[in-house]
């Protein structure tokens, strides 16, 4: 009986993946409401659970286990990019245009600031070659920009892994911290959400943090955060890398 159920779940991996994620979200929201009194958003708890589950698998996390193979598609780049694009559907273009200059400035400040913060940390950790410093600096932008930069510059797998870890930590901090500081930084309108997304940049962290703050702000923050990733992929392995090269030789 159990073997039959497992075979059915394996053959319908994507459906089971949706069911599993739904259960994780249900548990996370309950834990957030009942235990933390909403001080920690449910989405942040769900991310921590996901990271914990990834330890039980291989290169693809729990998707390496046949029963959870559907998670590879559910958590893959196709559906990820689809959800990122879908967030823009609820945005008001007039409000985005109103924040255009501020959002553009925020993008460049966010990418360059994060890059050099990560670069300084990398240097203090003992990485003194330009390729490693730039890769870890790019990881401080997002966990997508890091490996793309590392691959372009020929960085070692160890350094690329560190860059991904840096981006993941940033995502978690953004997810948890956004609703906690939203009131203090007046993150309560589309204009501020556009600027916030441009400064922080990690699309998943910004979207999750804004969802816990005010779901109506998600499209605005996610939109500039998406541009942030693209801008980081352009600047980090090129102009910013050459600047690091000039500084460290």
Image: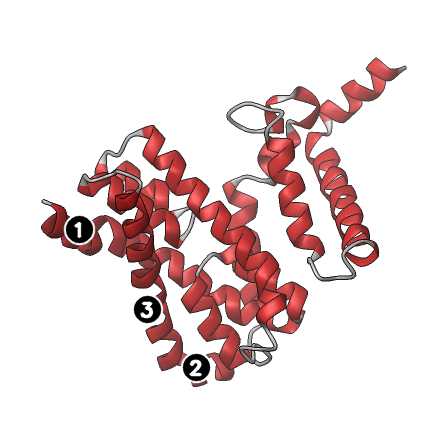
> Considering only order in the chain, which callout, 3 or 1, is on the residue closer to the N terminus?
3
Q: Using the numbered discs, state the Cα–Cα distance from disc 2 to disc 1 in whole angstroms.
A: 31 Å
Q: Which residue is drawn at 35% across and 74% down?
A: 104
Q: In which quarter of the image is residue 127?
A: top left
Q: Which of label 2 and label 1 is nearer to you? A: 1
Q: Mark 3 points at which residue?
A: 109
Locate the C terminus by quadrant: top left
Q: How crowded is mark 1: few (under 14 residues within 10 Å), some or many (20 or more)?
A: some
Locate the N terminus by quadrant: top right
Helix, strand or loop at label 1? It is helix
Q: Mark 1 points at which residue?
A: 244
Give the percent coordinates (x, y) of residue 67: 71, 23
Q: What colour scheme was applied to this rendering of the protein?
A: secondary structure
Residue 20 tag number: none
Q: Mark 2 points at which residue?
A: 99
Q: Which residue is drawn at 45% across and 41% down?
A: 165
Comparing 188 with 39, the one in front is 39
> Considering only order in the chain, which callout, 1 or 2, is on the residue closer to the N terminus?
2
Q: Which of label 3 and label 2 is nearer to you? A: 3
């Amino acid at each position: 009986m159990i073997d039959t159920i497992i075979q059915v779940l394996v053959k319908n991996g994507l459906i089971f993946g949706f069911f599993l994620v739904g259960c994780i979200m249900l548990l996370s929201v309950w834990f957030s409401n009942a235990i933390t009194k909403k001080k920690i958003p449910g989405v942040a708890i769900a991310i921590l659970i996901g990271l914990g589950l990834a330890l039980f698998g291989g290169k693809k996390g729990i998707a390496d286990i046949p029963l959870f193979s559907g998670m590879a598609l559910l958590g893959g780049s196709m559906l990820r990019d689809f959800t990122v694009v879908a967030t823009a559907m609820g945005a008001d273009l007039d409000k985005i245009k109103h924040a255009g200059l501020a959002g553009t400035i925020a993008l460049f400040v966010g990418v360059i600031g994060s890059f050099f913060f990560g670069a300084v940390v990398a240097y203090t950790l003992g990485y003194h070659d330009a390729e490693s410093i730039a890769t870890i600096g790019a990881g401080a932008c997002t966990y997508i920009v890091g490996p793309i930069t590392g691959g372009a510059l020929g960085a070692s797998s160890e350094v690329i892994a560190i860059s991904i870890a840096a981006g993941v930590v940033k995502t978690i901090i953004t997810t948890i911290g956004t609703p906690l500081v939203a009131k203090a930084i007046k993150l309560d309108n589309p204009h501020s959400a556009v600027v916030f997304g441009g400064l922080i940049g990690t699309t998943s962290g910004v979207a999750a943090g804004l969802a816990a703050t005010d779901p109506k702000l998600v499209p605005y923050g996610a939109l500039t955060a998406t541009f942030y990733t693209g801008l980081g992929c352009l600047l980090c392995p090129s102009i910013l890398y050459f600047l690091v090269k000039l500084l460290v030789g």
